Amino acid sequence: MCGIAGILGTHLEYIPDLDPKLAVMQALLRHRGPDGAGIWKHPNGHVGFAHQRLSIIDLSPAGAQPMTDSAGNWITYNGEIYNYVELREELGPDNFTGNSDTEVILCAWRRWGRECVSHFRGMFAFALWDERSRTLFCARDRFGIKPLYYTLAGGTFYFASEIKALLPFVDSIDTDLESFSEYLTFQFCLAGKTLFKGICELLPAHTLRIANGTLETGRYWEVYYELDFSHTARYFKERLQELLADSVRIHLRSDVPVGAYVSGGLDSSVVAALARPHTKGVFLGFNGKFSVGSEYDESHYARGLAERAGMELLEVDISSADFIKYFRRVIYHLDYPVAGPGSFPQYMVSQLAARHRKVVLGGQGGDEVFGGYTRYLIAYFEQCIKAAIDGTMNDGNFVVTYESIIPNLTALRNYKPLLQEFWREGLFEDMDRRYFRLIDRAPHLADEIRWEALGDYSPFDTFRRVFNSDNVGKQSYFDLMTHFDFKTLLPALLQVEDRMSMAHGLESRVPLLDHSLVEFVATIPADVKFRSGAMKQVFKDAAQPYLPDVIINRTDKMGFPTPWTEWLKGEVRDFVLDTLTSGRALERDLIDNRRVVQQIESESKFGRNIWGLFCLEVWQQEFQDKAAEFKQQVQLSPENAESR
């Protein structure tokens, strides 16, 4: 796990000041890899790489980067190729001088070229310079676990693990208006756009190639929902157990001790429980809690798992004082505003974990892969009612009947306001329109946003192209919903996972996002995954042997809730008001912060409006208001370049 960056003259032209530019990028990524640093520059001066190392596999100097091979190729790489042991055998042990997975990528490139990525099982983002063809090749893992951003500035190509390392080289730090509209709607951006104008994200499961002055990108992997109706629920459960165990086993490969996030929820609990038997000595779990009330504290569930699995649980009690102290740092490390409060406690738990371990396992991805969000139940229930009225219940669209869903509607007890709002504007539209209405947050921001400044762009058009994907059968509403979140929401959550762990030099691994496991789950029919209207039922069935009943039978899904509204009435209030009423805050082109301040008193329990707008303001202060400071980085000596 590391930080990577690089620069290329797209027509292989000499780049002035290549060395100091690479040093600045490296300094801005220093937090990602505190164990070592390296820079490589081509003798002709048209390409160079930077690297910050977090040593996990092959801790010796033989694992240092940027790394070269006998063919004169060079690589800078971030991530873990978990099947590097098997690939070494397949490629021939005599081809290797060290024991790192980085060297495996170089060897795989010589053997398979751009098809090498299809052989990798893991999380990765890398850039590889091929000396023979004079080509730059970049790739990102199938799910977007590891990040890669890029920009073209003055005909020069820049890439990095984090956007902040690109900002010294762009003409200006401006907001992309289409991306801003998407953020207000979904809380994330679509189609590789970012909130920074001119800066793109290489999409998950994509490669990027620059040769002869031409930049091209392409997809190398997709998940297809080719449903298997020939097997029983028992088969799917048992096969899922095998794949889960195998994924956790291979995710434990490391030359340093591994721990686990243990929230008390189903996903992280399964991962930790399966990991424990494969570890020797003390196995550490890490949990964060808020002591302001039981609705913000899942630690008793985490303790129940720790006791059953025989692990030691370390806890951090997160306070409002922590929020005031660290929140600006959270936004700086994220590069983005975040509309969900979970990023802040995740930062605090990662801080705790980094004091004891360099690698942790987590449960990210379970809700998107197995279907764990309550909104799926809301949308599916409406479609079942429509089918019952239309007499189309048996046409394949609704393999879960409304009769079976009814007993599970108690899960919606706390979602009555959402239901009222969802149905206020009508019923029974097309599936894409209905799901869009369910996740669209823009209507909540009618007064605070200067909508006229955003133009006529409609996020719904981009949403619809992703939602109505050809690789999902149009007969399964459940799969359409989960697939959209898998392709859009999940990478956004993984961005938070990466930044909050790497802010502390901590590697976070996500075994539920093993591509063999995800491909298998995509073949499970909805009436198995979503049996009797119970969310994540097949996953619960598979997890049952490993977890205490108190976790299996939980009905109070939390998702790391933060006591935001309670804090907003106390000592955090002045911090928020001071931030929103500073001179620059009251002069924003896109947000009317005077109206935001007026809405503070009406923020509902677990509300996100003020939180999201507050994050936007802090983001603008940390990046746009400090644009000159980022530009100054290029003039600073490397040791003085800022890495907060």
Image: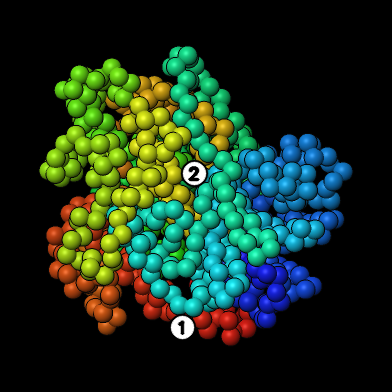
| Mark 1 closeness class: few <14, some 14–19, many ≥20 residues within 10 Å | some
Query: SS class of the residue under badge 1?
Result: helix
Most foreground residue, 335 or 246: 335
Residue 604 falls left or right of residue 464: left
Quarter residue 377 falls in: top left
Most foreground residue, 504 or 289: 504
| Mark 2 closeness class: few <14, some 14–19, many ≥20 residues within 10 Å | many
The answer to the question of whether label 1 and label 2 lie on touching residues, with beta carbons closer than 8 A, is no
Query: SS class of the residue under badge 2?
Result: loop
For the point 33% across and 21% down, which residue is it?
Answer: 396
Whether residue 130 is visible, yes or no, is yes
- What residue is shown with label 1? 628
Seen as rendered, the residue at the extreme right is 94
Q: Give the mark nearer the N terminus: 1 vs 2.
A: 2
Most foreground residue, 205 or 620: 205
For the point 53% across and 84% down, which residue is it?
Answer: 632
Q: Amino acid at mark 1?
A: Ala
Question: How far across and how far down the image is residue 525, in percent?
Answer: 41, 23
Residue 452 falls left or right of residue 207: left
Whether residue 552 is visible, yes or no, is no
Most foreground residue, 75 or 201: 201
Residue 129's disc number: none
| Vertical order, 607 against 512 (above or below) | below
Question: How far across and how far down the image is residue 85, in percent?
Answer: 73, 39
Marks 1 and 2, how far apart at CA: 38 Å
| Vertical order, 515 against 145 (above or below) | above
| Vertical order, 628 against 502 (above or below) | below
Residue 362's disc number: 2
Residue 71 falls left or right of residue 209: right
